[in-house]
Amino acid sequence: MESKIISFTRKELYDQVWSTPMTKLAKQYGLSDSGLATICKKHNIPRPLGGYWSKLRAGHNVKKIPLPSSGNTDSIELENSPGARPEKKIAKDFIEKNKIESISVKNTLKGAHPLIKQTSDYFKTLSKKADEMLILPKEKYLDITASPGSLRRALLIMDSVLKVLESKNYPVVIEDSKTRVRIFDVSITILLKEEYKTVPKKPKDHDLKWNYEFGYTSKYSPHSYDRVPSGILCLSIDEWVGATGLHQKNWRDTKSVVLEDRLPKFISGLIQIAAKKSEKTRQSKEEEKSREERKRILQQKVEEYNFEKEHVSGLIEDSGNWNKAHALRKYIAEVEKNLKSGETISFIEGEAEDWIEWAHNQADRLDPLKDSPSSILDDFEELEKACQRQSWW
């Protein structure tokens, strides 16, 4: 089905979100749950909280969060492509555009990809037993595990895969001990392994010179079987991009189809998973950006709050000090009045004029509308530090 653009108002999408569970509604528009949730968040559309639908089905009275007003545009556009995941469409478009209907696998390693040659050369240095797997150090070589009998075929298959990928500008590298393909803006881990099979253990030749322990062993016991190479090769994608079963990650030999004939589907699956991982990475970056923006806004509000709180406190303090300064000046005027009438003020030592000047200075120090005269009280912090250095105060 072809996709088409449909438009909603915020109210229309809000009504749908509160009448249909998000998982069902998202599928109707070919979106993921998180994709639809992101759209709702962007347009400030509230969504039902956890347990809403189960409580509603049980007949409980559930609260519906009202749609808040928003300064954003009221028009919302969605690309409606029900039943098709966007990453699947990307893979389909890629295959159709590049026409990978089949991938030929050569029967010679001559002219092999440099990583194949490097891996093959190391394999040659290993001692080989027909019933043992050859395992490489992953930090230097391609992630290929195979028995001597399947090794050449495994190298030829991987060689074809690498060449196809790099012909489409998808480079293959070995990093962090993994074989990775760079597709879009993400790295996808791939590997090729020969699978094991279980076979009954061969009976041992008994040496009657030695003592033996006898006991019952079931034929179903794991000790009755050996794990040996099966000859079945499997190409795998080692990435987690969602619930198990949504994306195929393994392509192996079957009774009817050999792995060589399944390489186009492997490439298609690789593109799908890369597209999904790219989408999840983009969403993660957008969510991180959104969190950082919310954090910035919150921090700005906290700073504005603290700034306002500090200034209000300063205003109240200044107002209080202004009142104290006026009360002090009234008190000083009353003292002057008493002195002029010839009364003796007991707390004034020395010249009365000196005391009156000192008292007016203290009033001016309190008054926020006056320049503060200098005082030894201004040196409090310096004196405190000096006393702490002398360990007395």
Image (cartoon, rainbow, N blue to C red):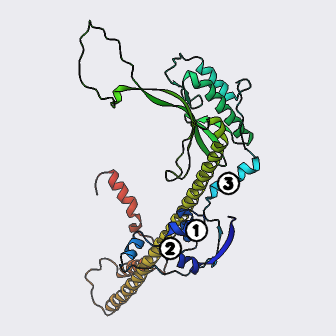
Q: Amino acid at mark 2?
A: Thr
Q: Which type of secondary structure does the marked residue at label 2 adopt? A: loop
Give, as a three-letter code, the residue at label 3.
Ile
Asked if the residue under mark 2 is in contact with the one under mark 1, i.e. CB atoms within 8 Å, the reply is yes
**Tag 1: amino acid:** Gln
Circle 3 residue: 90
Rendered view: 293 above or below 252: below
- Say which residue appears at 59% left-offset and 28% top-offset: 141
Judge by depth and name the residue closer to the eye, 323 or 266. 266
Q: Earlier in the sequence, mark 1 or mark 3?
A: 1
Label placed on residue 151: none
Q: In terms of depth relative to the viewer, which is nearer, 180 or 160?
A: 160
Q: Which quadrant, please, contains the N terminus? A: bottom right
In the image, residue 219 above or below residue 262: above
Residue that mark 2 sits on:
20
Regarding residue 360, the answer to whether it shows in the image is no
Q: Position of residue 374 (x, y in %)?
A: 45, 70
Mark seen at residue 28:
1
> Toward the viewer: 104 or 12?
104
- Taking the view exactly as shown, the residue that stands out farthest to the top is 209
Q: First in sequence, mark 3 or 2: give its number.
A: 2
